[in-house]
Image: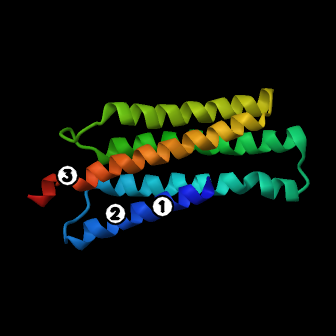
Amino acid sequence: MSEIAIAIVAFATIILVFRQSTGRELTQLQILATRSIVEVSLGIAVFALLPIVLVNAGFTGTCLWRASNGALGTFLVSFWVVYAERRRRATKPGDPHRGFTFFTVVIGGFLAGVFLLFDAVLWARFSAYSFGLFWSLICACLAFVWSLSVFAHPSASDD
């Protein structure tokens, strides 16, 4: 999963470079899209490797998955709360909302984080950790596809 997450970061960067090579300035929404893709993808890469680090630190069994689920859950909850506020500040009344994508990514990512926090306390399962990483990767892919449409359409400042 970490390889896919890093590939998403690379492609998002390529899109950004192509957009800036046209000489047009980026809108706040485009900056937010790129920043969010990079942050969540790098988070996925780090958290995909976290259990390996914890095993080398002496964590085993239930303790390993409690720590991993708790760390990933905390990251997801805090990331999506901060993202929602950033998006609110970056959008203007006339901007497209892309409601379904926004709802799927933000609310879904937040709920996945809450699920992981509950799992860390109650059950500590590997399957929950895999689900959390997989859902985060889906969120990054949805954000990447969304950013393609944001960068493809001219902004109001491009006129």
Q: Is residue 123 left or right of residue 98?
A: right
Among the 4 quarters of the image, the one containing residue 130: top right
Residue nearer the viewer, 53 or 11:
11
At horizontal 62% and vertical 57% (from top left) the residue drawn is: 2
Is residue 135 positioned above or below 50 on the image?
above
Quick one: 119 or 28, which is closer to the camera?
A: 119
Q: Residues within 10 Å of mark 1 (few under 14, many from 20)?
A: many
What residue is shown at x 31% (from left), y 52% (from top)?
148
Left or right, 20 with respect to 81, comes to: left
Alpha-carbon neighbours of circle 2 within 10 Å: few (<14), some, or many (≥20)?
Answer: some
Note whether residue 124 is visible: yes
The numbered mark at residue 153 is 3
Residue at 80% from the left image edge and 41% from the top image edge: 65
Coordinates of residue 125 in the picture (x, y in percent)? 78, 34
SS under mark 3: loop
Left/right of residue 41 with respect to residue 49 in the rendered view: left
Instruction: Name the residue that disc number 2 marks.
Output: 15
Q: Is residue 65 left or right of residue 107?
A: right
Disc 2 or 3, which lies upstream in sequence?
2
**SS class of the residue under badge 1?**
helix
Q: Which is more N-terminal, label 1 or label 3?
A: 1
Image spot of residue 91 (x, y percent): 28, 44
Name the image quarter holding the C terminus: bottom left
Query: The disc labelled 3 sits on which kind of residue?
Result: His
Which residue is the site of mark 1? 9
Residue drawn where x is 23% and y is 43% of the image: 92
**Which residue type carries mark 2?**
Ile
Q: Picture coordinates of residue 81 (x, y %)?
A: 50, 39
- Residue 100 x %, y %: 35, 31
